[in-house]
Amino acid sequence: MLADLLGRVAGCFPRRETRQSCGQMVRGLLMELDDHNCWTIAEAVGHRGPHRLQHLLSRAVWDDQQALDTASAWAVSHLDDGDGVLIVDETADEKSSCDAAGAARQYSGTVGGIALCQVAVTLTYATSHGHALIGRALYLPEARAADEEHRELAGIPEEVLFATKPQLADGLLDHAHARGIRAGFVTGDEVYGGRELRQGIRQRQMGYVLAVRANHTFTAGAGRTLAAADAVRLIPAGAWHRMRTGSGTKGTRHYDWAMLEVTSDDTPDGHDEGHSVLLVRRHRYTGTLSFYRCWTAGPVPLARLIAIAVTRWRIEEDHQLAKQAAGLDAGQVICWTSWHRWTAICLLAYIYLAVAAAQQRQHEAGQGLDVGLIPITVPELLRLLRDTLIPPPRRDRPHRLHWSTWRRRHQHRARQAHQKWNAYAETAP
């Protein structure tokens, strides 16, 4: 499967050397290393320095978006069960300086508050067979988008302008749709519950189950405008249903659910009204409420809407696993192009793992191999692949001594450069 995937993306590389470097980087990302960056991967795969991999990320001629599109289509072809769901969300990586493209002090749920970080909007394709990240877009905060010095130093193209996270999500959905990726529903958290994105989803003939805030306003059947938090009073006590929403290590999770018919506010021109409802979730112990704005072309059972709503958590798993298993958050890159190429290669590695794990789960289920084992996970599959399909890092003594010398020489030159700069800065008027 790995050879098949790398063969599919081979056409994105005009030169054989660049294609080989990409394959080596994918395998290097899957190796068991203390850290994943151009230096550690180059040493692990046997290069004499990091220059080939750095060239791959910065100056080499190849189409990273085409490579990711090809890998995404490959993933969808393996995972598609005729009932796919597209999930939008964002993830963040903390940074030590503002030099990286898009890095700024900004809020992120990933880091649990305001921090200096890069934020990327992502897209996951999920079915009953499995799920994988198939798209990403780097969020450029408005102040950074207007900072000409930052744009020049980070190599941000002139055509890249400020876009909100929902607008980036809409762009990812539009790109996936243009590539022929079809899904019945889109789901996401409260950031993506605005009218503009919901209308764009409907224009692509998809339904949605999108979380909204408690102060989200809508029009009820009688023409009254209400906030979501106030709408709970309209739900009769007997309309709540306790439904199972999944199982965790601590047991089965149950919530109380209800839905209330509301008036659609996002019907595109020439489209039917369809069915618009507010889905409400209530914690059975604390009474905490969560709200989801839903639209479907025809009537849909409550259980179906709940199943779509809880699917959203799969993208959180994708973020965690892509960082843990494929180094998605480990790239020490500054420029716009390098970030997109690093993340594209990381997603190649993660897409392979996600699809391979899904295929293995289906195989084991078909063979009746369930003998008190949980279904295979991406981390467990990666442990099995290392040193078998994925070669071990090169660790012979001459190679290690060469890299030790190379690192020390590079660090010596960097120290001299910093000292000369500091001496100049102290004497400059």
Image: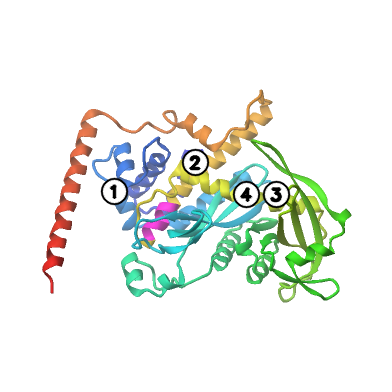
State the image quarter where residue 253 is shown. Answer: top right
Dot 1 falls on a residue whose secondary structure is helix
Query: Mark 4: which amino acid?
Result: Trp
Is residue 38 on the magenta stretch? no
Counting from the top left corner in percent of width and height, residue 175 is at 56, 62
Query: Mark 3: which amino acid?
Result: Gly
Query: Which residue sits at x=66%, y=23%?
Result: 371
Mark 3 burial class by Cα count in 10 Å: few <14, some 14-19, many 20+: few
The residue to which callout 3 is attached is: 82
The residue to which callout 2 is attached is: 4
Q: Are marks 3 and 4 in contact (CB under 8 Å)?
A: no
In the rendered image, which quarter contains the C terminus? bottom left
Highlighted magenta segment, given as a residue range: 337-343
Counting from the top left corner in percent of width and height, residue 145 is at 42, 72
Distance (Cα) linking label 2 and label 1: 24 Å
State the image quarter where residue 223 is shown. Answer: bottom right
User: For this rendering, which residue is in front, 190 or 8?
Assistant: 190
Mark sitting earlier along the chain (1/4)? 1
Nearest to viewer (mark 2 / mark 3) = 3
Query: Mark 1: which amino acid?
Result: Arg
Query: Which residue sits at x=74%, y=75%?
Result: 270
Nearest to viewer (mark 2 / mark 1) = 1
Distance (Cα) linking label 2 and label 3: 23 Å
Q: Which secondary structure dominates the residues rendered in magenta?
A: helix
Image-based side of 260 in relation to 85, left or right: right
The residue to which callout 4 is attached is: 313
Is residue 340 on the magenta stretch? yes
Distance (Cα) linking label 1 and label 4: 38 Å
Residue 75 is at least partly visible in this image: no
Query: Which residue sits at x=40%, y=75%?
Result: 146
Distance (Cα) linking label 3 and label 4: 20 Å
